[in-house]
């Protein structure tokens, strides 16, 4: 009998992993809440001495960013560059999330001004393209409601669609698809309105209407005997309402217009009538198939092509597709483009370590560690993986400063926040900052080495629309 009890006891020990088995967090003997003992231990981190009290008295009334400004770094700002693409005039996206559009169109604008000797302040109409961007995004959402009607409302894809029916952010493939489909017009043919410069109010109303229409389309699609033709007719009616909302707040896009072309000195050289497609063909025709997006995402395998589901502006257009590369491959291509006087679409995490008064991005601009008595030690991969960093803003990469050995010291981008922002409307970044917070750049085919260009032909890995790295640039 005694032997039996010993065997049962040993079996019980083995089933629990033995006497030294590690307990799961849920089995440990604490509540998980902050106890009195824990609080006493935490209080020791704030000594309450004269230095701590003095620092507290200062910090409670000031922004940590202002107090962390690194005085020793003040002399590092330098606006001289060994290689620079001369830009013409800085644009201003005002209170809108259209940085992606301004950036893409600025690349084309700079080329058009040089080729056709246009005035330095010439611009393509962002309002024109934004009208069609919002209309196409509305169609993308409504058609997705039809395509996914069999999935429950709790499905992650359906949830994402209803959370993101429309927005004013975007990326370069949107620029390419919209221009190819609708062409371009000069800014004076369809000028900015209050609602193109300030997009939040109309975007909220559009989103509300689209969610209502999306629910109705799902219900219709599920009805017995429903045909694709009837769904298409209903969707077209819904888009008619969206068109009216856009036309009332942004103006109606021209189908044809007469425009006076002026030279760099302001003299009229021609007066002609164009359709938007004809104007694009004459002044900015571009083979977008020869533009490639490369990205530095250290959380994923390099030298692979990735595609983002629903990351397009036009339903019958292309999803955003990119080749993931280390920074050591990306920088030389950017340098080659700048040396050849060609600007690039560029995006980064612009808010990190930005001295907005100077327009200077430097890892040493702010010394938060000394101010707060701690460290912030995550690398780029860790920041992306934990949602601490990601691409947030698109600008036009236009300059690089190289040392005697041809290595980059700093870079400059033309921004779209107006000439009064940053350094004459530009932002300057050190190469260290460039490596840590740059994420995407769009390059012309001729600046990409053949071995890397061949990799673009891979079958892409499809990533979900809700991936943290792929929020639209604003």
Image (spheres, helix red, strand yellow):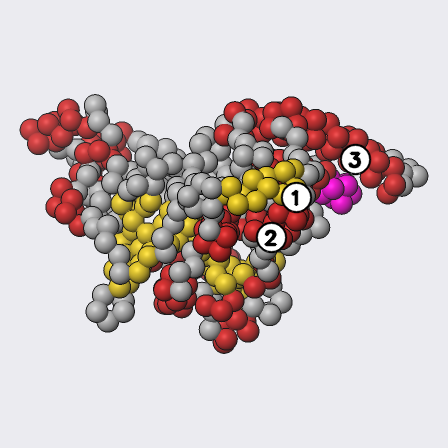
Earlier residue among tags 3 and 1? 3
Whole-angstrom CA distance, mark 3 to mark 1, is 28 Å
Instruction: Give x and y (percent) for residue 329.
Output: 40, 68
Instruction: Give x and y (percent) for residue 237.
Output: 79, 31
Q: Residue at x 27, y 67 (%)?
A: 407
**Few, some or many residues within 10 Å of mark 2 (<14, 14–19, 20+):** few
Whether label 2 touches label 3, CB < 8 Å: no
Q: Main secondary structure of the magenta part?
A: helix
Q: Is residue 38 magenta?
A: no
Say left or right for 349 vs 464.
left
Above or below, comparing residue 344 to residue 144 in the picture: below
Instruction: Give x and y (percent) for residue 31.
Output: 39, 35
Whether label 2 touches label 1, CB < 8 Å: yes
Whole-angstrom CA distance, mark 2 to mark 1, is 10 Å
Say left or right for 139 vs 360.
right
- Whether residue 311 is visible here, answered yes or no, is no
Question: Nearest the camera: 401 or 282?
Answer: 282
Q: How many marks?
A: 3
Residue named by callout 2:
282
Q: Residue at x 61, y 49 (%)?
A: 280
Q: Residue at x 46, y 30 (%)?
A: 95
Residue named by callout 1:
274
Above or below, comparing residue 221 to residue 434 in the picture: above
- SS for tag 2? helix
Which range of residues does the magenta coloring cover?
143-150
Disc sitting over residue 236 in the figure: 3
């Amino acid at each position: 009998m005694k032997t039996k009890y010993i065997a049962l006891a040993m079996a019980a020990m083995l089933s629990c992993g033995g006497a030294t088995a590690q307990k799961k967090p849920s089995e440990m003997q604490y509540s998980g809440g902050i106890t009195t003992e824990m609080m006493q231990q935490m209080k020791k981190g704030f000594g309450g001495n004269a230095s701590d009290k003095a620092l507290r008295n200062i910090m409670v009334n000031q922004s940590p960013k202002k107090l962390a400004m690194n005085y020793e770094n003040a002399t590092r700002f330098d606006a001289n560059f060994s290689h620079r693409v001369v830009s013409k005039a800085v644009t201003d996206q005002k209170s809108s999330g259209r940085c992606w559009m301004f950036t893409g169109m600025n690349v084309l604008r700079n080329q058009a001004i040089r080729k056709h000797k246009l005035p330095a302040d010439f611009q393509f109409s962002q309002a024109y393209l934004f009208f069609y961007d919002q209309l196409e995004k509305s169609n993308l959402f409504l058609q997705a409601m039809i395509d996914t009607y069999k999935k429950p409302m709790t499905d992650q894809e359906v949830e994402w669609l209803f959370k993101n029916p429309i927005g004013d952010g975007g990326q370069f493939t949107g620029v390419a698809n919209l221009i190819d489909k609708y062409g371009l017009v000069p800014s004076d043919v369809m000028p900015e309105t209050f609602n193109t410069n300030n997009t939040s109010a109309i975007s909220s109303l559009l989103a509300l209407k689209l969610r209502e229409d999306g629910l109705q389309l799902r219900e219709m699609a599920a009805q017995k005997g429903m045909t694709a033709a009837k769904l298409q007719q209903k969707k077209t009616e819904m888009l008619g309402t969206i068109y009216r909302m856009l036309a009332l707040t942004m103006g109606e896009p021209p189908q044809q217009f007469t425009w006076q072309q002026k030279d760099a000195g302001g003299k009229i050289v021609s007066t002609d009538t164009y359709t938007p497609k004809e104007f694009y063909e004459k002044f900015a025709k571009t083979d977008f198939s020869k533009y490639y997006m490369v990205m530095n995402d250290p959380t994923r395998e390099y030298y692979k092509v990735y595609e983002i589901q629903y990351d397009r502006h036009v339903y019958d257009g292309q999803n955003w597709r990119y080749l993931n590369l280390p920074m050591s491959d990306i920088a030389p291509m950017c340098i080659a483009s700048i040396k050849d006087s060609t600007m690039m679409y560029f995006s980064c995490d612009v808010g990190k370590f930005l001295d907005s008064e100077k327009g200077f991005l430097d890892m040493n601009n702010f010394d938060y560690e000394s101010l707060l008595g701690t460290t912030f030690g995550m690398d780029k991969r860790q920041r992306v993986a934990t949602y601490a960093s990601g691409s947030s803003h698109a600008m036009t990469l236009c300059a690089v400063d190289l040392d005697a050995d041809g290595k980059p010291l700093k870079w400059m981008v033309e921004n779209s926040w107006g000439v009064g922002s940053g350094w004459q409307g530009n932002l300057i970044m050190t190469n260290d900052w460039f490596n840590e917070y740059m994420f995407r750049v769009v390059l012309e085919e001729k600046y990409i080495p053949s071995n890397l260009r061949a990799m673009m032909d891979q079958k892409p890995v499809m990533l979900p629309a809700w991936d943290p790295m792929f929020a639209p640039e604003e």
